[in-house]
Image (cartoon, rainbow, N blue to C red):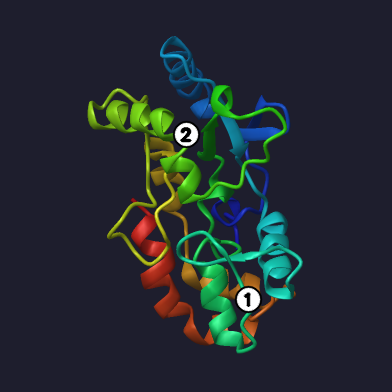
């Protein structure tokens, strides 16, 4: 396992873009340009999530499996925790990537909102309701820029009709950079990593890994 960067392991070249949020150094200029363009149009591009280590994604996965973090239905509402291990796995996958296969491991992907539209004290949840509500104008701005090819390399990857992960309008990716990093991704390496960690639902994940890759991983390697 010589190149572990695509899995959230290794030592990426990160820069702190906003307090507490780190991104791959090579996308900083384009991200600053997109942020400035948003500001000129009355928006405040605020990062809610950026680079995540494998350990961070594993923690999210395990806490959702244990019930420490809420599970959300396809419509973004809280749901009961399934008792069946396979059902639980798929429930987590509705909104969370497999550890080691999250695009947030690349440092090229961020979750964004319009900070100017957030009411004071409001805790962002990153849900479809927010995209269609308080952040609707901001996401319409991003969509317009992407369609005009004026988004400085950023695009959405979790869109309707692509794989089984639900659409995430808040998630944008710097595709020219992420494509290079994903060239080194290997499912066999991911399987080896899983063999060495304590992951909830690991038995069923390993049993279904090729199928999961076709439905929840590879469709988003664009």
In which quadrant of the rendered image does the N terminus lie?
bottom right
Residue visible at 42% across and 71% down in the picture: 213
Residue 101 place in picture, x, y as percent: 53, 61
Q: CA distance from mark 2 to mark 1?
A: 28 Å
- Front in this rendered view, residue 52 or 166: 166
Front one among 181 and 138:
138
Q: Which residue corresponds to the image point at 48% horizontal and 70% vertical from the top-left?
A: 187
| Figure quadrant of residue 217 | bottom left
Name which of mark 2 and mark 1 comes first in the sequence: 1
Write the residue at 68% across / 61% down.
Answer: 60
Quarter-wise, where is residue 107 in the image?
Answer: top right
Q: Give the residue pinned by disc 2.
A: 135
* Mark 2 secondary-structure assignment: loop
* Horizontal side, residue 41 vs residue 4: left or right: left
User: Which sits in the foreground, 55 or 180?
Assistant: 55
Identify the element where label 1 is drawn. Answer: loop
Could one spot residue 191 in this view of the protein?
yes
Q: Which residue is mark 1?
A: 80
Left or right, residue 163 beside residue 7: left
Q: Is residue 92 above or below residue 101?
A: below
Q: Position of residue 86 (x, y in %)?
A: 55, 85
Q: How many marks?
A: 2
Discs 2, 1 touching: Cβ within 8 Å: no
Q: Is residue 171 visible?
A: no
């Amino acid at each position: 396992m010589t190149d572990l960067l695509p899995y959230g392991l290794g030592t990426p070249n990160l820069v702190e873009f906003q307090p507490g949020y780190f991104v791959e150094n090579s996308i900083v200029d384009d991200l600053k340009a997109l942020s400035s363009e948003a500001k000129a149009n009355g928006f405040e591009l605020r990062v809610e999530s950026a680079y995540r280590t494998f350990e961070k994604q594993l923690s999210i996965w395990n806490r959702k499996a244990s019930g420490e973090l809420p599970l959300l239905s396809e419509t973004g509402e809280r749901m009961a925790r399934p008792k069946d291990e396979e059902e639980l796995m798929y429930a987590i996958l509705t909104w969370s990537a497999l550890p080691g296969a999250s695009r947030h491991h690349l440092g090229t992907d961020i979750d964004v909102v319009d900070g100017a539209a957030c009411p004071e004290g409001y805790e962002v949840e990153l849900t479809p309701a927010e995209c269609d509500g308080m952040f609707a104008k901001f996401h319409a701005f991003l969509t317009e820029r992407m369609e005009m090819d004026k988004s400085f390399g950023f695009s959405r990857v979790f869109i309707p009709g692509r794989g089984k992960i639900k659409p995430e309008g808040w998630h944008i990716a710097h595709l020219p950079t992420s494509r290079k990093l994903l060239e080194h991704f290997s499912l066999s390496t991911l399987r080896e990593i899983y063999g060495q960690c304590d992951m909830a639902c690991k038995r069923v994940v390993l049993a279904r890994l090729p199928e999961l890759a076709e439905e929840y991983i590879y469709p988003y390697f664009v």
